[in-house]
Image: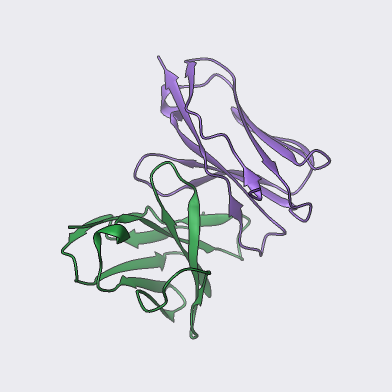
Amino acid sequence: GAVVSQHPSWVICKSGTSVKIECRSLDFQATTMFWYRQFPKQSLMLMATSNEGSKATYEQGVEKDKFLINHASLTLSTLTVTSAHPEDSSFYICSARDYGGSDGYTFGSGTRLTVV
Amino acid sequence: QKEVEQDPGPLSVPEGAIVSLNCTYSNSAFQYFMWYRQYSRKGPELLMYTYSSGNKEDGRFTAQVDKSSKYISLFIRDSQPSDSATYLCAMSEGGSYIPTFGRGTSLIVHP
């Protein structure tokens, strides 16, 4: 089945610094990838849709300048949390759909971000 | 009212029990229904998906959809401690649409 690889699985950074999270589709091409944020015991909150070769589409309330998304190739999307603050600490998960397969959306393993 | 409602639990059952997990929804345009399992500190893993009303079985798991009642269920037979996880329902207007997730139900299966 489709595999999505996300890296790093966890990261601790100092307040004010930037952190980049990578999401790769390993065995399929993904023109679209999705970035979610999840707080403890809460559902997945869609942050943005990453589109290969064009600008990302952000959900209402998500700061574009804080959460920079780049989808430079058909297999790689990155999320950069800029000038991170403790309130940005969360679990970030990416997802993609293999339209050539029959599965639903495949998720990465997630990145636990802690800003100190 | 949220589009998808799911009781967060936790739901605690003994090993071997039959587990019933449920979601209700309000958007009648939803046609594609999914269940995901999420272990702690991991991304969700797709368990089952279906377009149809009725039952779909896969091993110990059965997904049930009742579109007329806007109600979906996931049944787990012979539950095992390894089934302990959070189960999220998700649904969309079609396979190409971004799914809407429930908040997940935490399941604990104790030996």
Q: Is residue A55 positioned above or below A16 on the image?
A: below
Count the marks. Answer: 0
Residue A29: % across, % down? 50, 71
Chain shaded green: A
Write down the quadrant of residue A84 in the picture: bottom left
Q: Give B107 or A90, whichever is nearer the viewer.
A: A90
Residue name at image x 80 percent, y 43 percent: B67
Q: Give B68 or A54, whichever is nearer the viewer.
A: B68
Q: Is residue A61 positioned above or below B47 on the image?
A: below
In the rendered view, does B96 fall on the left or right side of A51? right
Residue name at image x 18 percent, y 65 percent: A15
Residue name at image x 73 percent, y 48 percent: B26
Residue B46: % across, % down? 54, 46
Scheme by which the image is coloured:
by chain
| Residue, far front | B1
Q: Give B53 or B6, whichever is nearer the viewer.
A: B6
Residue B22: % across, % down? 64, 33
Residue B41: % across, % down? 34, 44
| Residue, far right | B68
Q: Is residue A17 positioned above or below B105 on the image?
A: below
In the rendered view, does B19 fall on the left or right side of A88? right
Residue A79 seen in the current view? yes
Q: In which quarter of the image is the C terminus of chain A?
A: bottom left
Residue A28 seen in the current view? no
Q: Colour of chain B?
A: purple
